[in-house]
Image: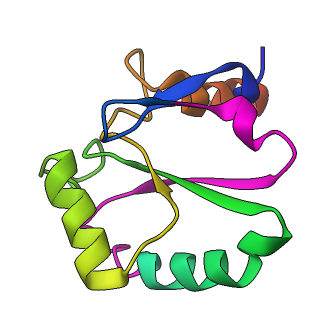
Amino acid sequence: MNVYDHAFLLPSKGEKDMHDFQDKTVLIVNTASESEFTNQYKDLELFYRKYKDKGFEIVAFPCGQFKQGEPNGTEYHLNFCKENFDITFTIALKSWVNGDDAVRAVATIGVELDLP
């Protein structure tokens, strides 16, 4: 089983199949609106706009597991990203990225790389 065998939930209540990204270069990133790394959104968006026409995609998974970097709900997160960074790449529903309840598309990466 690999990352493309999974899907993840979208804020619109729909689901996105990772198979849709199979022929692209995909950066899967854990994000948060109240983190020391929040400003990464600016560079991620610039990078995405520069390379999206060459088959590059970003899938962001907002998560509050690490230092409560995302204590807010998904709707807040989406508005924050749009208003502050004009984000156009894919943002998943707020979810767990680590542990037993982690989104399978993300957890599989750890398995494939033999991460603890």
Residue at 17% from the left image edge and 52% from the top image edge: 75
Q: Dividing the picture into quarters, in which one does residue 55 lie? A: bottom right
Task: Classify residue 62 as left or right of residue 52.
Answer: left
Please give the name of the residue rendered at 72% of the width and 19% of the height, measured from the top-left corner. 5
Residue closest to the eye, 77 or 99: 77
Q: Indicate the quadrant containing the N terminus: top left, top right, bottom left or bottom right.
A: top right
Q: Position of residue 84 (x, y in %)?
A: 27, 83
The reply to whether residue 115 is in sight is no
Number of numbered callouts drawn: 0
Q: Which residue lies at the image location 82% right of the left edge and 39% below the top edge?
A: 22
- Let me know if residue 37 is in the magenta part: yes
Query: Is residue 31 shown in magenta?
Result: yes
Q: Position of residue 74 (x, y in %)?
A: 21, 47
Is 69 drawn above or below residue 81 in the view shown? above
> Where does residue 31 sit, x and y in percent of width and height?
39, 58
Res 47 visible: yes
Question: Which color scheme does this rendered protein use?
Answer: rainbow
Which picture quadrant has residue 113? Answer: top right
Relative to residue 30, is residue 104 depicted above or below? above
Q: Indicate left or right for 6 with 78 as reference.
A: right
As rendered, which of 85 and 104 lies closer to the eye?
Answer: 85
Q: Residue at x 43, y 76 (%)?
A: 41
Position of 71 with respect to 108 (left or right) is left
Q: The C terminus lies in which quarter of the figure?
A: top right
Q: Position of residue 7 (x, y in %)?
A: 57, 25
User: Magenta span covers which residues?
Assistant: 16-39
